[in-house]
Amino acid sequence: MRKIIPVIIGTTFTMPTFAISVAPVSGASVTDAGQYSGYTCVKVTGSGLPVNDTSLPTTDTSNCSATAAIAYQSNFSGGGVGSTVYQKRYCTACKSGYSLETKSAVSTLARDCKVTWQECEVISTLICDGLECEGIASWQNSSTTGNETRCNADTNKCEYRCRSGYYDAGGMTIIGGANNCKACPTNATCTGGNALPCCNVGYYMYDNNYNPSISGAQADYECLRCPALYGVYGTTLPICPLVAPTPSDITRCFIPPNTDIDVTEGTFQFTMNCNYSE
């Protein structure tokens, strides 16, 4: 008897697979990292219980107003069903004050999977964010003694100057750092900034630290009373100095004219200002 063997023509058989896609989704996607030629990373849909991918940086979802998760697995090109299905949770919308920022990393659990996702990060609108002068556009007291600070919006860096009641003693400082501000000496007024102390009328300024041979030394000003001539104290004009003393401004002191000066021989007066000379 002759056997009849049926032949099926034009039909092939394929192994069943999970429903997969390589198309990116809104807020997250997976791509092949290209590290292993035998593996391909694919996005998985319809998976039951994917495992959290702990090899990726943790996403803080507390700032999200909505979240989602992307599932993926690494398939071996030799055939067969892919490996464990992993997932990464991400933000799809943010709370007020936060914005979506894109992150990406290569998984070490799902071989050859590069995952891209979105997180919510705070919107930084403050000038000089993170610095002492953060958000400060006009001069305010600084934590550094005698200083006040503000943010220079053009450079996004803090600026410093001595505040009222202090003077800039100079000396070595860090570029862009606070000034060496010292309290205003007795018998003087200090307006801050770059202004020198302004001694009261009848007083002159003296720098206790003046030494021309030392570069960058801090000044140490005091206001001393003008010396007396036969019991009559000298005075000064109500003009604030523009130049630092070297080391003394004593020559600003003078005895005014028409001032009685009593001596053993009698009383005399100067006909014009008689300045002190050294």
Image (cartoon, rainbow, N blue to C red):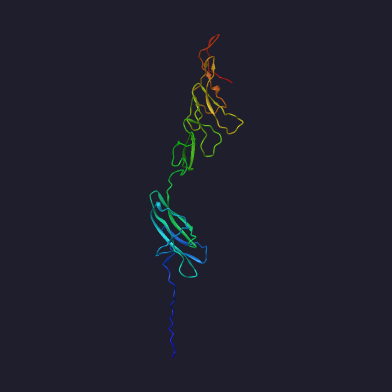
Q: Is residue 85 above or below residue 157?
A: below
| Residue 84 at x, y percent in the picture | 45, 64
Can residue 114 be seen from the camera position used here? Answer: yes
| Residue 64 at x, y percent in the picture | 39, 53
The N terminus lies in which quarter of the figure? bottom left
The C terminus lies in which quarter of the figure? top right
| Outermost residue to the right | 213
Q: Is residue 97 above or below residue 150?
A: below
| Residue 203 at x, y percent in the picture | 51, 22
Q: How many marks?
A: 0
Can residue 24 be seen from the camera position used here? Answer: no
- Residue at point 53% right, 28% down? 221
Q: Nearer the viewer, residue 234 or 210?
A: 210
Q: Nearer the viewer, residue 56 or 102?
A: 56
- Residue at point 39% right, 58% down? 68
- Residue at point 42% right, 60% down? 70
Q: Is residue 220 above or below residue 21?
A: above
| Residue 2 at x, y percent in the picture | 44, 89
| Outermost residue to the bottom | 1
